[in-house]
Amino acid sequence: MRINIPSSLINKYLTTKELNEQVGEFYNAYFESFNDYVYQDNIDLYSYIKECLEVDEYDKEFVEFEKEYNLKNVKELNIKDYISNEYIKNINIENKIKHKGYTLEINKYYPYFMFIYDEINVDKNNYYIETYNIGYFKNTFKYLSLSKNNVTWMSTIPHEINTMKDDIKKVKGNVLVLGLGIGYFTYLINNKKDVKSITILENDQEIIEIFKKHILTKFKDTTKINIIKCDALTYLKTNDLSIYDYVYVDLYHDANDGIKFYSIIKNIEKEYDTKPIFLYWIETNILCLVRRIVLDIISDYLYSFKFKEIYSSLKENTFNSIVLIILNNIKDIEINSKEDLDYLLSDENLKKLIIK
């Protein structure tokens, strides 16, 4: 790697990366310890977050940080936009269902409970600043949830609804869906006239049984749907995917969990030209993580030169094996301008850097 631009410019990107991470830590600190808000008319929700986290209102650095990252943007959501959702209106259960370690039940967001309701926003023209979408309802919001050992696998919360919305609009023809969950994505694309068939890959027999017994029976039409019990990655590697028009990937809980699947499937995707089109749940969040890795590599290249050796000694770790793929892909690049650096960190290029 050759970097021929001033370190002062690169430091703007590195500082922004660190601040991006601090924003995530700021909200997570609240969500993990204090998100039990009981409404009082005279308390502003954002002020309540700062009070819980014991933020110094007069700290000049925090005031600038607060303004730059729009931390005050805690938004009331219109509950009607969500309870009118076709799945939420039509797929319901009366009692909690337990099945071989899984629990299917109705949970609630109480009034003024705060949550992340969409993917991260990225300002590509301002050193890739990341901002979060924090929302709340003024009324109780009920949602269907599937969990195992107190870990939620799938639920119809606003975050799930918003992060799938665009991909639901896109798919048509013959669709391959990786991961079943409670069938939210499947239900909504099943209602589309331009979707001809839906093939779902699911490796967990218990999830399949819960879905067939308690959810699929509520579908108006099931003739398009075919569920295959198998390992999704094995299926992708051993079958001709060109029979599908779209592949929708939803095998993970979050970006940290998803980056390994993203890398593996991106390497499979490169073998296909025009079809299928691959769509990835929370792809923006995953690419934010990839971008941070690239910036960490650049930082280490400039300031310590130990990054490659550190990660080479941790090849058994899946995440670090991805770092090695990225390292290998950028080792011979030259950065001669801000435009070169912006391209390196662009979504378009990051999708290539994660491919072997």
Image: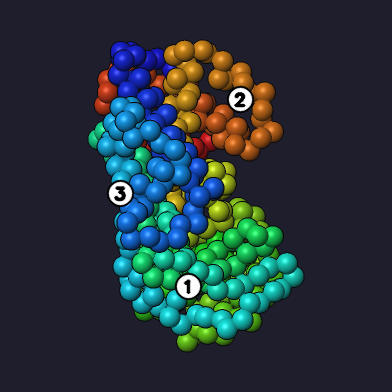
Q: Residue at x 51, y 26 (%)?
A: 327
Q: Write down the quadrant of residue 159 in the picture.
A: bottom left
Tell me which residue sits at (44%, 38%) in the image. 54
Pinpoint residue 126: horizontal percent, then vertical percent: 26, 33
**Circle on res. 73:** 3
Mark 2 vs mark 1: give the one in front.
Answer: 1
Instruction: State which quarter of the image contains the N terminus.
Output: top left
Labels 3 & 1 near each other (Cβ < 8 A):
no
The x and y percentages for residue 43 are: 34, 54
Q: Quick check: 303 above or below 106?
A: above
Point out the tag, 3 or 1, that comes first from the N-terminus. 3
Horizontal side, residue 73 vs residue 353: left or right: left
Residue at label 1?
Answer: 142
- Which residue has dot 2 on it? 311
Amino acid found under the numbered disc labelled 2: Tyr
Q: Residues within 10 Å of mark 1 (few under 14, many from 20)?
A: some
